[in-house]
Image (cartoon, coloured by chain):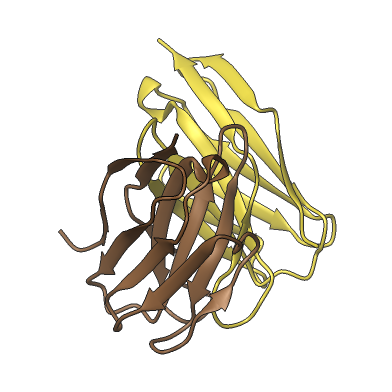
Amino acid sequence: KQEVTQIPAALSVPEGENLVLNCSFTDSAIYNLQWFRQDPGKGLTSLLLIQSSQREQTSGRLNASLDKSSGRSTLYIAASQPGDSATYLCAVNSEEGAQKLVFGQGTRLTINP
Amino acid sequence: NAGVTQTPKFQVLKTGQSMTLQCAQDMNHNSMYWYRQDPGMGLRLIYYSASEGTTDKGEVPNGYNVSRLNKREFSLRLESAAPSQTSVYFCASSETGQVYGYTFGSGTRLTVV
């Protein structure tokens, strides 16, 4: 059974810092991995999707990497801003066809002005 | 705006009551999903529908039923609500294939007393 872990559960950093969020998964046979952002009381917003054949994806100040063999992904946020404060979740899909995601518990990020 | 619409946004039920959570998407996606999110936990898949006319169980299907009414709509029914079903429920949709991300609704916060 696929299990996804995100450490730390919470992170607080000053504005302007570059930071890395970590995600690990137990079964390396995945089709893709997604990173989501969730604001309090809101739904999830897809940030980046990495296919199993890719090593990384970039969108603006965000860069996600994938190392299937070690079962790890990182989300790098450059020049953090208070507006980046949210919970970040990673999720993996291990099946073809419908994307049945297995989620980590999330990292709650706070950027202090 | 295009996206996934869930109704209602909030609901309080008494133990044993029934209700249906509604979900509709206007992106012409083939696949639709229902997840629940509990405090301190990631999202867990309840049911999914890979395409119109098909439904299948996810990780935590007990106590729930679903209907894929047409390509746009996917409903989740609680026949006899229990306090353990107190949670935030999210509907999502995606296109078939591994290159596409998810689109989530804004969630239904359900309390069973």
Is residue A61 among what the camera can see?
Answer: no
**Quadrant of the rendering where the C terminus of chain A is positioned:** top left
Q: Which chain is yellow?
A: A
- Identify the residue at image location x=53%, y=38%: A88
Report the side of B95 relative to A87 (left or right).
left
Relative to B50, residue A102 above or below: above
**Quadrant of the rendering where the N terminus of chain A is positioned:** bottom right
**Residue B39 location in percent, x, y?**
56, 33
Q: How many numbered marks have been drawn onto this rendered protein structure?
A: 0
Q: Nearer the viewer, residue A1 or A39?
A: A1
Q: Which chain is brown?
A: B
Question: As drawn, which residue projects farthest toward the left?
Answer: B1
**Residue A63 location in percent, x, y?**
54, 47
Q: Nearer the viewer, residue A107 or B85?
A: B85
Q: Nearer the viewer, residue B12 or A74?
A: B12
**Residue A104 location in percent, x, y?**
65, 45
- Identify the residue at image location x=55%, y=62%: B46
Is residue A28 among what the camera can see?
Answer: yes
Report the side of A57 relative to A21 (left or right).
left
- The answer to which quarter of the image holds residue A42 is top left
- Identify the residue at image location x=63%, y=40%: A105
- Identify the residue at image location x=26%, y=67%: B24
Report the side of A90 relative to B71 (left or right).
right
